[in-house]
Every structure is written in structure tokens, then in C-alpha cells.
Amino acid sequence: MSTPIGYSHCNLDLSNQKLALLGLVQTALDRGVHAIRLPALAPFVSGAPGNAGSPLAETCPFADYYDLDALKRFMRIFGLDLIEDPETNTEEPYGSFMTGASAVGLSGARGLGALYGHVCQFFSHLIPSIRVAETLATFRKEVYDSLAIKTALHLCIDTDLSEEAGIVACETILRKVQAWPTLAETPIYIACEEQTLPVSKEKIRQMARNGYGLDLVWKSDLLTGQALAAWNSLDLSLLDFETALAASLFIGNSHSTFSNLVSFEKFCRDRTNIQNHAIHNGQEATLTQRRDNGVECDPILVATSLLQRLPLVPLGTHDCRWPAAIHAHVAGFGDMESTTAPVPGLAGGDLVVGSPRDDGRWICGIAIAIEEIAGIAIEYRVLDDTGQWSDWVANGAFAGYHSDHRALRGVAIRLAGPAALHYDCLYGATFAESDTCIMRANGEACQSPDQRAVTCLHVLFRPAFGACPRASRSMPTIL
């Protein structure tokens, strides 16, 4: 039996403690370990001395904040057990945090198909405990029902700033918020560690109201002094997090793990791409809409439509939900993939790479794979930038370029094996300087008349008889 792994606690803020626990899960799965010591949760205040593994006067049992049975169920499904063994301190907590953060980035970059993996399932099973849930329900009812608040803003400002610099930072954020076209005319809930702000709450409130016509509500406005005195940083952080997650519009900072996890956990819980989240640290004069489900830190990548994987063709009633993936190298972005559900028949993501809205990010090369299903295989070839078609390659082989300076000019895809007699492989593509989708099927050449670069590719599979015409007839161009 493999040696259990674990650590006692992680002296980082709550969002990073969750990432550290995920890192422990990731490490166990990578090493084939089947038992994990569940760490305690640690109260933490920004700017306080100490590190991820430093001794604390007091830690809190995980079960005080999250449903332990839900976490155990997740662990069991992925072949892991939770143990209570104080001698199991084999891992460095900050290293586990880095592993967890990396796992979120890699998993989230797979699209909706990642919802079935251990990373997304981990966060969807982090359910507040009954003790916390009762408090949350009362608080959120006050925020969203009684006060009719629609927007939550994570006011993330560098604690090392002077008061003067902090005021400038606040004004920059408030100016962008005010310019957001769909901002509701209701107060805005502010999520932050109030005691660490370089500017007082009242100064920020006055600045927002007088300069920008915005009313701000803080948790300390709604909680009694007795409750605030009794709660530690874990209580307050979890209250902020779950309240922000329930907002109709959430505004955060892409350099903040709190903000990013609000978006990513909403993606995991709702099981669909997030729609009404934005960041205030982009380059625009107003907010920047998130299109990345919370997995990117770079404000430019946060906004790219590549990560939404918007389908070029709607999924039909009879379309086949097969476990499959497309890997692509996209100019100016790097490698990306799009995956469906790992089990045949389950709803998952669309097989889409690239975006018709990003002309500068053409597709340089692709690899398409279908999981082993009896009688189903796939073959494909590409038109290179010299006008030559490559040889046909099979399941998972890479075709094209890894260089950003060379683009695919066309694709052809077909099923192989007995399944090809009963199913059609359809694929649509858009090309540079055009959002017109050209649709082809069963090995036909999909290219623009003047061989422009491919900017987006969508692949799907349909039964050959009944709802879908045989694709020996060229599919029409879809505008």
C-alpha cells in the first residue's frame, strides 16, 4: 500500500487553502496514492507574518466550514480515502498550493468537458457545512432580497499602498464600474478584507457616492458588532465568497485567486460557461467581460472568445455524444483543447477550437481523438500554407504546424471503421477576415475559395439515416 500524504494546515487565505487541498488531491492521483490526511483550515489575515506551514495558535476543523460527507463522496469516486493521522506531514503546503493552481489552469482550459474531471468535481463538492449554510442563507437574503442588490465587487487593492495611492486605485476601479453599460441601479456589495485596506471604508463610500453615483454596501454594514467580533477571517472570507458567487454580476481582479475562484467555482457548480462576470484590471476604460471561466490571470486572455468555444453549428437532437477531443495550436495563444464528456451519451462540451472573432489567432495545427469505442475511428488531413494537402493521419496524430507563423488553410475529416457506414462526420470552419462558416462532411475539403487561414473549427457526428442527409452531397455554406 502506498504511503498516505498530507500536511497539517496552510497559512494562506481561504481561496489559496482550497487550492492547496486540491494540490494534495492532484499529487495523490499523480503518484497513485490512495489516502490523504485532511488538513485543518487556518485563519489568515493579509500582511500577517508567517508562511504556508508556520505554527498557528488556533486552527479550525475542515468540517466546521465544509460538508465532510460531500468531500468524502468525491474522494471515494476518485479512489481516495481521508484519514486522520497527525504523523502524515509529507507535503509542503505552499507547493501543494502551486500544484492546485496549475491543475485549475490545465483543467479549465479544456472547456465544458472538464466538468467531469476531478478538478471541477472537487470544487462542486466543496459545499458549505450546515452551520455556515444557515448563516449564508440569512445574509444573502438580506443582500439580494431585502436590499435588491445585483452586483458584487471584489475590492482588491494592494495593502502596501499609501492612502493617497489607495484613493487613486479606488477611483480607477469605480470609474470603470460606473461605465459598465449593464450595471444595475442598485447598491453594490463590496467583498474585501476591510481591515487591510489602505483607505477607510467611509472615505471609499463617500468617493463612490459623490464622484460616481454609486452606493456601496459592506458586510460590516449588515453584521452586528458582536457578530464581527466573534467571527474569524475564515468566517468572513467564506461569507464574502459565497455572497459574491450568488451575485447577478460579479466584478473582480484577474490577479486575485479569490476573484478567479468565484468565477471558476460558479462554472463548476452551474456546469455551464459563466456569463456575467467581469474584471476591473483590464486595459479598457470600462470593465472587461470574463470569457475564461476564471482560469486565466492575464487580463488579455481573460477576455478572449477562444476560451468560450462557441459552436459554429447548433447540436442537433440526434447528434452523437462520443468521448472525443480536439487539440490545436493557435497562433498568439498556444496549445488549447476542447473535450466532450468522458462517458458516451453524457452532455459535454462542443468540439470547437479557435474563434471566428480572433482573426490574428489562426489555427496552426490539430490533433483529433475519439476514445476507444467499438467500430469508431477517425482520420483527417490538413491543407498547409503552401496549398498542399497532407497525408491522412489517424486518431490523435498531430497534423500541421507548431509555429505561430504558419496557418492551416483547410481541413478534411472522416470516420473510419464500420461506424463510417452508419454515421456522418460533419465539420465547419471559419476563415480569416470572415465570420462565414463553411460546412463539409465525410472527408470533403473544407476551405475558403482564396485559401485563407482557418480561425475556428467545429466537429460533430450524426447518424447517417433519418434526421441527417448523407454527406456525399456537399453541405451548404452556413452564414
Image (tube, rainbow, N blue to C red):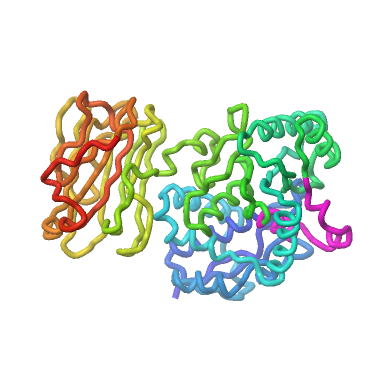
- Write down the region rendered in magenta: 217-242
The picture places residue 102, in percent across and down from the top left corner, at 50, 49
- Quadrant housing the C terminus: top left
Q: Relative to residue 134, is residue 443 drawn left or right?
A: left
Q: Relative to 189, is 348 above or below?
A: below
Q: Nearer the viewer, residue 209 or 385?
A: 209
Whether residue 430 appears in magenta in the rendering, the answer is: no
User: In the image, 42: left or right of 376?
Assistant: right
The quadrant of the image that shows the N terminus is bottom left
Left or right relative to 220: residue 382: left
Q: Considering only vertical position in the picture, is 26 above or below 165?
A: below
Res 29 visible: yes
Image quadrant assignment for residue 59: bottom right
* 241 with respect to 469 (left or right): right
Residue drawn at (54%, 41%) of the image: 290
Disc tally is 0
x and y, in percent, of residue 370 in the image: 25, 55
Expressed as whole percent of the image width and height from the top left, the position of residue 204 reads 81, 37
Is any part of residue 43 visible from this angle? no
- Residue at left 51%, top 33%? 300
Whether residue 219 appears in magenta in the rendering, the answer is yes
Residue drawn where x is 17% and y is 27% of the image: 387
Q: Nearer the viewer, residue 201 or 4?
A: 201
Viewer-side residue, 92 vs 187: 187
Q: Main secondary structure of the magenta part?
A: helix
What percent of the width, then of the height, locates residue 432?
Answer: 32, 27
Q: Quadrant of residue 159?
A: top right
